[in-house]
Image (cartoon, helix red, strand yellow):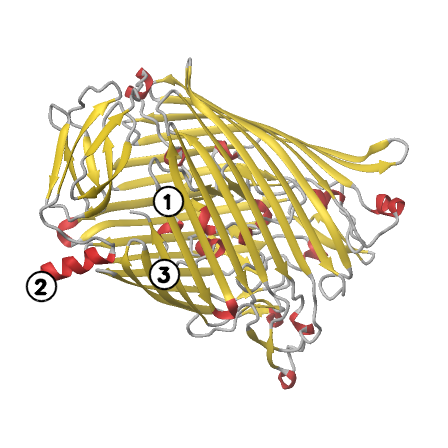
Amino acid sequence: MSARALLVGILLCVGVVPSWASQVRGSVTSSEGEPIPAAAVALPALGRGALTDSLGAFSLSDVPSGEYLLVARAVGFLPDTQRVSLPGQDASFRLRPDPLLLPPVTVTRPRVREIERTTAFVSVIRPAEAPSPTSTVPELLDETVGVQVRSMGGHGSFSTVSIRSSTSEQVRVYLDGIPLNQALGGGVNLATIPVSTIERVEVYRGVIPPNFGGSGTAGVINFTTRTPSDSLRWNYGVSYGTWDTRMAHGWLSRRFGPVAGVVAVDYSHSDNDFLYWDDNGTTLNPDDDGWARRRNNQFLSFNVLARLTSLSRAPVRWALSYSFLHTNNHLPGNSTFHELLSTARLRGDQQLMEGTLGGALPWLSEGEIRLYRSFRRDRYENLEGLVGLGRSNTDDTTSVWGGQLALSTFVLPANRLSLHAGFRREGFDPNDLLITDAQERERLFYASRRRQRSAYLSDELALFERRLVITGQVGYEHVRNNVLQDTPLFGANVVDTSVVEAWPRAVGLMLSPRPWIRFRANWGTYMRLPNLYELFGDRGSSVGNGLLRPETGTNCDIGVELQGSHPSWGIRQANAELVYFESRVTDMIVFWSVYNRMKPFNVGGADIRGVEASSSLATSLGISTTANLTWQRPINRSTLYGSLYYGNDLPHRPRWQFDLRTEYARGLVTLFYGLHAHNRFFAQPVNSLADVVPAAWLHDAGVRVRFCRWLAITLEGKNLTDVRQFDSRYVPLPGRSWFVSLQGMSL
């Protein structure tokens, strides 16, 4: 096939009829009609552009006929777009002024993002770069070094995260700066976060930066939703796969003068009725084993995101966002009773609202105020009593509102002082629909309230053009927990309360003697507050303990990063990282059986140490690879049951985990392969061989063909070797699955 014929075919794919004599001509002027020289006019569809002359005129020759989008930009003016049809139509742009304000501080001290300032070890995930269009948030995080995800089986099932062998409650999770961790406890369900609305995920391992509160046992996961663009852009994707799994998403972004907005919608559903090998609850008797189908395991989610941001280069910037998250999880319960059909399900609706206002202030280089509001409703139906401890029908609500203030200034040219203050009020109101008597409901169920105030002062010393950075932070946290009971005569009455104060602190060091090498080291103390259920819970089989002390401890890490490129060898980008970490937890909170009821106590601690190794390589041959290896030794130091568990491994923590991702792109075709592996681990703290979860090697592969920007088809398979894995003795995970996806985006 000749080159001309191939080009004609490509142009036909995007709906363009070639005509080699067409020419795009036009002018760029200001709103007053004055010509703008050296303005850039781009034709994104063909990857071409031109600059205006001294009279503001431009021309592009040899452009095939058709309809095109032109973009004009000039320094000091807002960009503008215009559609033209060729041949026969010229373009005329009138750009509105947008003065570029450059305060002296921004000339001598360019703004550095928080992720670049921190000395902590950070992994950044961009879901749009993932080769698999069906990847979920739990799957993307599980591939990250130092991170383990525990899933309850199937697409959209309840999933929690652990960083460096922590519990899920010791990991702070944020969505656009809004804390998702609830004072009620239980960890954040990652399956409720739609991956299609996420633009970037930042995983801070170990010491937490002060802008996230500074105090935390293991780290922070910060989700950032899509940012509006300054031009019309859109994206869509639909997928279908095994177990009637259906996914669809789309987003649209557009500019409206000095304001830009984005709207995103996400839908996901799966029956999750996969086959699994069931031992019928008799591990030592293989005669009654057989294949069973997972029933009542359906999942459905629907999510909406809307955001408005300012685009003007004025000193003040602002943003508003709203998110609605809906999930409907059916709960199959214990796999031993698979022959009993359960209708149990958990429905959740959450609304998140956020507003930020920031910019430069007198005597301050940066200042930002953030206000947020969250409302969550959880409805749990278990009318047959086949899941958990018995029949339930609850309708609980959690309401949160809070704010954050961030101020920073340069005391000296290389010394930056920052203050991060915040407040948060959270209320939990339970309701059991099985109890029809109002007085009985008031006697058994109590509302909980938590008020939290915090302030962190951090100091950063950056020397030798940020080749040496030393940071230190100290914080104060004050938390008051109240339990309320409604009475007919006096209304809400405080029946129990607790107050906790803490002074966490941390120091960090970053040294970069050469551009290709960087050393980091961190040390800090932390605290995890007991959640409201651990303090005041009363669910019949378990009760709270108002005398609980917070989990406290220290963590530290030290490591080296290498990065560089070598175009002559075909290496576009290469990165490597090696980190050693240690963590010690004291006053660990564990539920203990007391008179046939479970009650939490501070029972000891844990010592954790490990190594994280990660690397990535991108070549000019179209091959890119990332590899992550985590080795850890989580030692239980609990004195529970006469030190029965002392020296054992903490449950559900594999000692090593390995992830590999490889892509090969050639023309319109991309091949990708993934490997996820871990060694065996114990499902119970006693470390019994009867509760060992075996090692697993899971292989994924797929191919994507992009016909044009608005159409790409992906075929992929997950768990290709059909490993029948259990997350614990009674929670089977799905086997082999297949998916087909269609994707497209704007020019």
Q: Position of residue 598 (x, y in %)?
A: 76, 54
Q: Would you name the residue on which mark 3 appears?
A: 660
Q: Position of residue 46 (x, y in %)?
A: 19, 47
Q: Amino acid at mark 3?
A: Leu
- Marks 3 and 2, the one that precedes in the sequence: 2
Query: How would you rate the neighbour count of disc 2 (Cα within 10 Å): few for under 14, some for 14-19, many for 20 or more?
Result: few
Q: Would you name the residue on which mark 1 appears?
A: 559
Q: Amino acid at mark 1?
A: Gly
Most foreground residue, 151 or 584: 151
Q: Quadrant of residue 489?
A: top right
Tell me, for residue 2, which label it has, or none.
2
Mark 3 touches mark 2? (CB < 8 Å) = no
Query: How would you rate the neighbour count of disc 3 (Cα within 10 Å): few for under 14, some for 14-19, many for 20 or more?
Result: some
- Which type of secondary structure does the marked residue at label 1 adopt? strand
Q: Position of residue 632 (x, y in %)?
A: 47, 55
Q: Is residue 550 visible?
A: yes
- Which type of secondary structure does the marked residue at label 2 adopt? loop
